[in-house]
Image (cartoon, coloured by chain):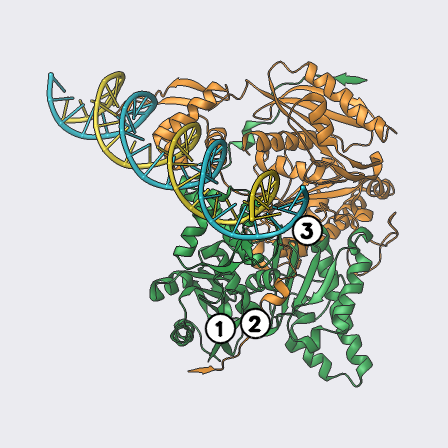
Chain colours: A green, B orange, C cyan, D yellow
DNA sequence: GGAGTTCGTTAGTAACCTTTACTAACTAAC
DNA sequence: GTTAGTTAGTAAAGGTTACTAACGAACTCC
């Protein structure tokens, strides 16, 4: 039974009109954009599963064999795709010509600027396999000096790149906007440094600059096999996180997503933090403080208690985030000896005891498997995505 | 100075190969897809700022006047767009013909199934202005009975729709997947009910079914003028949230995003919850318990303390989420008398004192302005987005 | 009234993907 | 060994789509 009552003119446009009418240019699709998109789909399919034929691609991507042949011809012309020869199977019909991305024919340069003492970098192939490494000392180097250190590192790595370079990816600490401008990186004393533009101009190569934790997150997603809804937490001198939702990196309203280091944990005080508050997550987990506390431990049991307590704090902080975003995976990156044992267990237990039971079933908490290269590999993924549409 | 060291064959494909090679079909862009996209851009531009000419649209969207004319001709043919007449301005050149979306020529039906006692619904125009209302009593009605109540409500509303119906939107409690199947809604005893499909089949109209809090969030975003990175929290018998990141609704790995009601708050115990844990956010904020506590208050000051304490708990929970996602706005929806005063203040103060100072500057915390219609309006937006590409 | 500007349309072109039709190369069955 | 059936890839033709170039209409300004 329905009780009805008409009422006209409530709410509606009034509030809506306050919104900016901004359709950003470039959103429209012209034929060449469509082509680029389809081309990226082909590359993506080839990247994920090598050994596909044109016909396989047609089925996978949803375009006709004719169109795929045309796209592939372009890609082969650019040497981005190579023919591997005939498929060895024995089955009816003309044997297929297998294709693959030219994984060894190009390289990518990735940089990790997150360490206080050294900028690290690497040259990798398209699979993220490291071919060359480099690092440059930056203890106490800031401002323009730090920028020059980036150039020095890149000069060295690019000189040793034996194949054409697809692009340069850089994971920087601090807040980085979508154009790759470092809005603010206190440790490096960088303020509004358009690093991406500077690098692109200087080397005449595509460049991608983003926050280090965000880079680590997409690195873990592509090369670490992480889920499409995951969070990567980097623990070191500070604490930062990168969040992937629905396979996409989150940037936040002020490009400051993942900044959970200075969120207060729990309702029972805690140590004083450099930021002025008490009980910030960083005071519990950042390695300098944590290691100092561990140094005071008299035996292994005490050590474990300290680590477990730190893990609990992380779990308390993550609870609302994991619940709100319905994440399926949380990955920790940082010194394995500190994070890997009791701390990880403490976090897992706390998360389990403080969130909905329905969640536990498909929530994975683990350490990264990418080790020290995580940010560099993330930078590589960023270039792959930006230049080839692949991830 | 660069210290270098080559090292081959680390990480790379191994982990990556474990990932499923799934390029979902339909991702490719055929000419007609491009056309549909461009058409949506035109509608979007018209929707947000009425009184644009074809030439204005060309500038706004980035297509040529010719193409825009062609698209607009199609839209006029479908009566989705109308000509308003010549622009009244006095300036050089041929006067422009102003266009607008045919805001009053079509209607949308929106339903809100989140209330335990009544299913509410409305017929609105494309601006979300309510034209007709309806409701149906469902106290104690569950399962198939609830489905039939939905049909009864829709039958009544559709019968009174004086203009062609663009589509039907439904905000349902519980977990709803991307296809609009209610995976689980305990209160309604629904399990895997393909409500969207059922409605679409029954009425031969486009249907959109989603979680009520998610609907509320996009309703607040489009009609309440909320930011692109925001969270809407619905407080009632339970507690649910909808999260918008970068203008996009978040669904979560198991379509359960926003389920923060059963995340434990703080480190100092709390009341026992129906879920078995202690100190869940719901035990602090859900209206039944909160009102019971308020009933025991002997004076206004005590009332305020209770509300402020509840607000603090909300702030404690939100801290990590606001920080991690770098949200710029948090909106509360629910009984204004309970949420609007001390509770809101308590939440704001707590958020301020527990998150990074840099965040406070551009974080807004407020009550919704959409009132009771918030879910219905969200459902309307969902239909607008789904059918016209507008939001 | 002429020059300049802006709007919207017409005509022709280029890009893109599709359908249809073909050849090549294989397996399986008689 | 021949024939039928299948699969891969290419070629030609066709339909959409959006672009450029060009034009008339309708206005302002001098």
Q: Residue at x 71, y 59 (%)?
A: A318
User: Around disc 2, counting alpha carbons within 10 Å, would you say few (fewer than 14), some (14 to 19), or many (20 or more)?
Assistant: many
Q: Nearer the viewer, residue D9 or B251?
A: D9
Check the image and report above or below for A162 versus B334: below
Residue A271 image point, x, y percent: 70, 71
Say whether disc 1 or disc 3 marks the residue closer to the N-terminus: 1
Query: Pointer 2: what residue?
Result: A373
The answer to whether C20 appears left or right of A232 in the picture is left
Judging by the rendered image, the residue that carries numbered circle 1 is A122
Residue matched to label 3: A325
Q: Position of residue A182 (x, y in %)?
A: 46, 62
* Front of the two marks 2 and 3: 2
**Gap in Å between the C-alphas at discs 1 and 2?**
9 Å
- The correct choice, above or below, for B82 with respect to B358 in the image is above
Q: Is residue A255 visible?
A: no
Q: Secondary structure at mark 2?
A: helix
Disc 1 is attached to a residue of which chain? Answer: A
| Quadrant of the image occupied by residue B334 | top right
Q: Residues within 10 Å of mark 1 (few under 14, many from 20)?
A: many
Q: Quadrant of the rendered structure where residue A240 is?
A: bottom right
The image's mark for residue A343 is none
Label located before the other in sequence (2 or 3):
3
């Amino acid at each position: 039974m329905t009780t009805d009552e008409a009422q006209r003119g409530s709410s509606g446009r009034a509030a809506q009109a306050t919104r900016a009418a901004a359709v950003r240019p470039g959103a429209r699709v012209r034929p060449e954009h469509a082509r680029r998109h389809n081309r990226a789909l082909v590359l993506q399919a080839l990247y994920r599963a090598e050994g596909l034929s044109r016909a396989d691609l047609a089925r996978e991507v949803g375009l006709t064999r004719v169109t795929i042949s045309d796209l592939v011809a372009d890609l082969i012309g650019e040497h981005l795709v190579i023919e591997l020869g005939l498929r060895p199977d024995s089955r009816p019909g003309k044997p297929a010509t297998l294709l693959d991305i030219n994984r060894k024919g190009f390289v990518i340069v990735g940089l990790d600027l997150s360490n206080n003492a050294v900028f690290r970098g690497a040259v990798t192939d398209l699979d993220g396999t490291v071919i060359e490494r480099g690092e440059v000392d930056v203890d106490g180097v800031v401002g323009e000096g730090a920028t020059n250190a980036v150039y020095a590192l890149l000069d060295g790595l690019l000189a040793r790149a034996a194949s054409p370079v697809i692009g340069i990816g850089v994971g920087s600490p601090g807040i980085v906007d979508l154009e790759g401008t470092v809005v603010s990186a206190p440790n490096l004393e960088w303020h509004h440094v358009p690093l991406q533009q500077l690098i692109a101009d200087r080397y005449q190569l595509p460049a991608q600059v983003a926050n280090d934790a965000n880079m680590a997150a997409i690195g873990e997603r592509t090369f670490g096999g992480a889920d499409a809804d995951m969070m990567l937490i980097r623990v070191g001198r500070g604490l930062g996180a990168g969040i992937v939702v629905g396979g996409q990196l989150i940037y936040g309203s002020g490009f400051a997503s993942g900044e959970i280091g200075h969120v207060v944990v729990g309702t029972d005080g805690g140590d004083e933090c450099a930021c002025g508050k008490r009980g910030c997550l960083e005071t519990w987990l950042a390695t300098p403080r944590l290691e100092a506390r561990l140094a005071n431990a008299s035996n292994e049991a005490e050590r474990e208690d300290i680590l477990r307590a730190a893990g609990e704090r992380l779990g308390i902080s993550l609870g609302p985030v994991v619940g709100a975003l319905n994440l399926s995976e949380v990955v920790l990156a940082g010194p394995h000896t500190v994070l890997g044992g009791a701390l990880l267990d403490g976090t897992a237990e706390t998360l389990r005891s403080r969130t909905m039971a329905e969640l536990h079933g498909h929530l994975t908490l683990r350490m990264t498997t990418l080790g020290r290269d995580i940010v560099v590999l993330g930078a590589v993924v960023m270039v792959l995505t930006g230049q080839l549409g692949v991830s």
